[in-house]
Amino acid sequence: RKTAAPGAREGVGQLEHDRRDAALAPMGNATSAIETSGDCHGTAARRQNNRDVFGAGVSAFRQELSGDGCPAPIPIREASMRARPRVVVRKRPLFEHEAAQDFDVLSCQGGTDVWGEGDAAALWVTRAMLAADHRTMYCEHHGFYADAVFGEAASTAEVYNAVLGGPLQHGSTTVLCFGQTGSGKTFTLAGIIDILREALPSGGGRWRVSALEVAGNAVTDLLHASARCVLRDDAGRCTRAVLLPASSAEADAAG
């Protein structure tokens, strides 16, 4: 078993805890089995060729998470931490082509109370491992802590209500979606925009909504059919998104 260094629990959102145990029966925090396929040196090949073995380890680990046992202590959020940004994880389901050759290695633990105090939540990532003898397989489970974790069954409406339902009543809010290509950033943000159209009051008050996608040096406005734009500071040093003329955007894209 490996645990994080002392003091690591102070930061919500970082790697907090690793578990590695060998030869457990039934398979829980580790899976130990003999590899027989002959192609096990790459992580992806090892996971795909032995998905039944490693999948059983993931299932047993999830049973442990849902029971009384906890692989690691969950950080406690205190009132003094209210001013910091909140870290929220949303897990997307596997695509059909992914499920056809691989299996789910992400496990959610904890609740979806983004703004409350008390226990945080965790996302566990299972690694398909091979021992030094190049024959014995086992699982490692790595926990990443956040304020809230939404599983693949959660709807965008649930995410919206938990993240924006309260803060929108009290001032400005920024939602920053970060992740690799295909992780669901645009899908989530587009769903939030659709809900906002219905949620914002039509009469009275003044609301300003912007939705930008930043990919390298390219910035597009999701509220204007993904039109190209640039970021500029105004006289009050507030950053604004300025739409590029069609000719400039085309020339910029060609260059």
Image: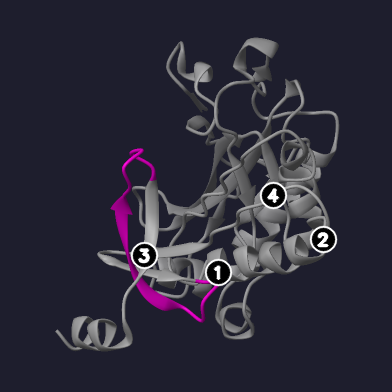
Distance of label 1 from label 4 (alpha carbons): 26 Å
Q: Are marks 4 and 2 in contact (CB under 8 Å)?
A: no
Distance of label 1 from label 3 (alpha carbons): 20 Å
Q: Are marks 3 and 4 in contact (CB under 8 Å)?
A: no
* Residue at image mark 4: 206
Which quarter of the image is occupied by the C terminus? bottom left
Give whichever of discs 1 and 4 has the lower sequence position.
1
Residue found farthest to the left? 255
* Residue at image mark 1: 186
Region of the chain picked out in magenta, as a range: 222-238
Give whichever of discs 3 and 4 has the lower sequence position.
4
Q: Are marks 1 and 4 in contact (CB under 8 Å)?
A: no
Distance of label 3 from label 2 (alpha carbons): 25 Å
Foreground disc of the pair 1, 3: 3
* Residue at image mark 3: 242
Q: Are marks 3 and 2 in contact (CB under 8 Å)?
A: no
The amino acid beneath tag 4 is Arg
